Image (spheres, grey):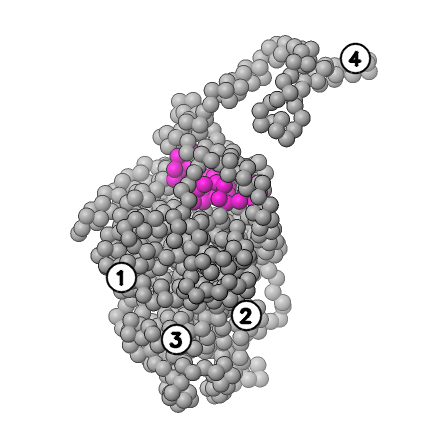
Amino acid sequence: MNVSGSASQRARSAIFARLHEARREPAGVGVPEVDAALAPLVAEPAGESRRQRFIRHARSWQAEVIETTPLDWPVQLLALLRARGVRQLFAGPGSPIAATLQATVPADQLRWFDRELAALKPELFAADAGITTTLSGIAASGSLLLQPGVEEPRTLSLVPPLHIALLHEQALHDSLLAAIRHYGWAQAMPSNLLTITGPSKTADIQRLLVYGAHGPRELVILLVQNGDADAR
Amino acid sequence: MHAEAPIKLADFHANARAALNDPKLRDSFSGAMDFLIERRARQFPDPAAFEQLRRVGEAVRQHALARLPELLVQLEERLTALGVQVHWAETAADANAIFLDLARRHDAQLMVKGKSMVSEEIELNHAMAAQGIDCVETDMGEYILQLDGDRPSHIIMPAIHKTKRDVAEIFHEHIDGAPLTDDVNELIAIGRRALRDKFASARIGVSGVNFMVAETGSLVLVENEGNGRLCTSVPDVHIAITGIEKVIEKLEHVAPLFALLTRSATGQAITTYLNVLTGPRRPGEKDGPREMHLILLDNGRTQAYREQRFRATLQCIRCGACMNHCPVYTRIGGLSYGTTYPGPIGAIISPHLQSLHETRDLPTASSLCGACGEVCPVGIPIPDLLMRLREAGRHSVAQSATPPQQALRGQGEVRQWAEALAWKAWRLLYSHPVLYRLLVWFAARLNWLTPPWQGGWTLARAPLRPAPQSFRDRLAQRRQQRR
């Protein structure tokens, strides 16, 4: 390799030599069940469904939650785009909702994330909104779980000032730990995994909370109910 | 942009005195710390539940440290298999040389940087500026400070010592076309616009790391603003830098640490983003870095690791709860410490990163009230560590009652003959009753000789004067009278 490569190797050997000098238990000290992290630290209302809990927390983080159905969400989306005066909605061309979007959103408003970011930067940085699907949601914190990748790139949920996310109720998990175990990521991690809880924010000036720091100012969640669960 | 003020460690006392006499600074610190204490308390209403979670957090960190060399090897293997280049740095200069080499290879004039205390530790911005490379802070607080040539005074709320009026003036002066406004929404919008151009044009994005997961080779970043995500998904190259101690064994260990971190830091149950990065952009992906590097920094951490008595220092997850609850930090502010990490955590980590001698005042900048240890989410016995550092500074290996395996940097160099002599005399008197009584007899009779000036003590207190009759004598007298 290069000069800094061999310097790095020298540093590596020196660091490991010092670490190995230390007296320790190489087997580790053992970790008690991390399930303690599952218990809520603040009491939650009894008798609340997973869905209700998700909605309550998501709203407390300033996310807008629109409850809808598999047939109705495109209608809700159109109404939302009209209400916000969205001119350019970005979406992933390989996304499971691509066909529905194509059929719903007027062609002059819909933009596909169909090239590498380098070629799309000016348009994406000028867009009003981005729409993504979600892998799951976390009821205990009102968070969305996203796995950006080939179909829906990372910046789709990050650069436009309005992020619209489609979430299916049956995909909800109780906690982050439950989701980690369910998806078996410890064995195979995607290149990027995210939890998103409300719009981006900062309190860096005099502790005053402001939304839309560097990411979206607004997060709207289209929460799609199970097909036959309208009665709940 | 101005150059940052150089660190002046030797000035701790002068810095602290100046901070104490600055009512504006004291107001903003005590207000902010009260706010953070109250918000954290609301997140942990049940002490038993906190204790249970803290025990898990502590065990996760202790377990990882016990297996540190093995986990670092595993992490490096996973990362290398994913296509991440792992670099090792013993010192700040090593780390900066790696950054410079990467910047030159990519012909980068501009880097955008997410919040990273380790990059502050190596003074990356300075080192890059000296080579004509602009390293721009993108965390709002850090950006404000960089424009003003100032440094962070808190690890989580870096610009806590600035008012919105200060920020308005800084933006107006340094950002083209920024109007002078007091409106915080408007100020953040100005910062957002100015930094968007930087994100779009920078070739290299720099970030810190909150946790590294050995079993998956993942880097975990925790943030609210979204600048960390931008730094790690828009530029072609991502360079992450962190300390070697940040590794944990399993992905599910993230859950308890993340729960403890956000609640302890800002009193939030969760942050806006938890961003888990596992290798660079994969085939078919349209964004994310094409090249990813991780720089693992030692810079004194192996010294804390080598000595079991100091190893707990490395359990830290950088939440800042210890400083929020510290009565000394709250009064003198973060800048007085003159180190990258201020407050109680700064007082226990800085002696290893620098030396006991350079940081000699920091372990004594504590009343040992114990609040820091009580709130620490990973159970670091901070007051004990402060005591051990005081001892190590004042005793060489040969003099020490608890000698380290090897001398710490600056071991024994804080020793002052007058202090050492005073303690020797104290030990002599308190272990020889006859000598002790003799001294008390004289002290009681010669108490009119007590000097009215007694160093630091009489600056704010009445002089100490031996009583005309010792406590022991009074007790003896009473016993006699009863008979």
Q: Is residue B226 visible?
A: no
Q: What amino acid does circle 2 point to?
A: Gln
Are discs 1 and 2 both within one chain? no
Describe residue A23's horizontal placement relative to residue B140 as left or right: left
Circle 1 chain: B
User: Which residues lie in the magenta part?
Assistant: B328-356
Q: Crowding near pointer 1: few (<14 within 10 Å), some, many (20+)?
A: some
Query: Is B343 within the magenta?
Result: yes
Q: What amino acid does circle 1 point to?
A: Glu
Q: Which residue is mark 3?
A: A126
Q: Main secondary structure of the magenta part?
A: helix
Are discs 1 and 3 both within one chain? no
Q: Which residue is mark 1?
A: B291
Give the alpha-carbon distance from disc 1 to disc 3, as whole Å: 26 Å
Q: Which residue is mark 4?
A: B480
Q: Secondary structure at mark 4?
A: helix
Identify which residue, B154 or A22, lies in the foreground: B154
Give the alpha-carbon distance from disc 2 to disc 4, as whole Å: 76 Å
Of discs 2 and 3, which sits in the foreground? Answer: 3
Q: Which residue is mark 2?
A: A62
Pointer 2 with pointer 3, Cβ within 8 A:
no
